Structures are given as structure tokens and as C-alpha cells.
Image (cartoon, rainbow, N blue to C red):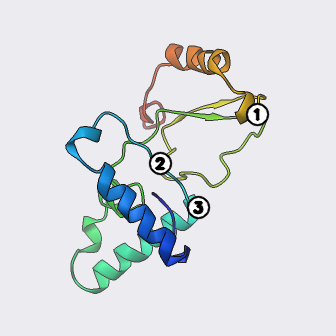
Amino acid sequence: MIGERLVLPKSLQDIIKQVEDVTRTKHTDKLDLMLAICYSGTRDILQATRNICEKVKAGVIEPKAIDETLFDQELWTRGAPHPDLLIRTGGRLRVSDYLMWQLAQTELYFSQVSAPEFGEAEFLQALRPFQRRERTFGSDHML
């Protein structure tokens, strides 16, 4: 689960912890399911920044040690790969404060079809242009 779990009722926090503990085994390495509950990409970046500031203040790390890898490890998604493709349904042409840091190199696909109706045909339609793209991961503007 990513998000601000401390704002959830204690009973729900306990259930989430139980599910995470049960599913965090060597038998679940083929599928990652991430639930975003009380999640905001902007708040994720803010809390990561605060955590790093506290570590600098405590002398745990030096400011010069702060890089993308360290920052990424302070986010709620720590350790999870960044998405390769974001499919936004329902005709919305924005990312809506979702994974703001993690989407930096993500390919975006916008569909007019709403999520409940978004099926296999629409999914394949989203994958076709993605398969044809040359992924440069930012190197095209770093000349």
C-alpha cells in the first residue's frame, strides 16, 4: 500500500499490515500489486523531502549524498520499478497527482474510454504505439 496509512482507522491499518505480511513471501515474486490509498504524488514528494531533511539534520547523511536513488528510496513506492506506460482512461488529459516523481520517464497514453469499459481491445490499442516508441529515458534532451 502506498499513501498516508496513519490517517486510516487503526483497524484498517492492521488489516493492511496483515495482508502485506501474508503476501510478502518468496512465492509472490511474479506479481506486484500496489494499492494507492490516501495517496497524493505531491504529498509523497513532500514527505520524502521531509524525511531526507530530518536525516541531514540528524547527521545521518550529507547533503551532497542526496541523489535520485536516495530520493526514490524515501518515496512510498520505494523499491518498486517506475511505470513504463501510464494509461489514463475517461478522456482526462492529466496525470492527476499520481506518481509525480515516478512518471518522469513514463510513456503516456490517453483514452476516451472510461475504466469500466476499458477492455482487451482498448488495452491492445494502447500497447501498439508504446511498442513502436524508441525509449530514450531523457537522453534526447541532455545534449
User: Which residue is found at the position 78% from the left and 29% from the top?
Assistant: 112
Answer above or below: position of 119 versus 9.
Answer: above
Picture coordinates of residue 16, whole percent (x, y): 44, 62
- Mark 2 and 1 residues: CB-CB less than 8 Å, in contact? no
| Spatial CA span between label 2 and label 1 | 23 Å
**Label 2 sits on what residue type?**
Gln
**Which label sits in the foreground, 2 or 1?**
1
The residue pinned by badge 2 equals: 102
**Label 1 sits on what residue type?**
Ser
Determine crowd level at label 2: few under 14, some 14-19, many 20+ residues with C-alpha closer than 10 A: some
Secondary structure of the residue carrying tag 2 is: loop
The residue pinned by badge 1 equals: 114
| Spatial CA span between label 3 and label 1 | 21 Å
Q: Is tag 2's residue or tag 1's residue first in the polypeptide sequence?
A: 2
Q: Is tag 3's residue or tag 1's residue first in the polypeptide sequence?
A: 3
| Spatial CA span between label 2 and label 3 | 12 Å
Give me the disc on residue 40: 3
Secondary structure of the residue carrying tag 3 is: loop
Picture coordinates of residue 126, whole percent (x, y): 62, 21
Picture coordinates of residue 137, whole percent (x, y): 42, 33
For the N terminus, which image quadrant?
bottom left
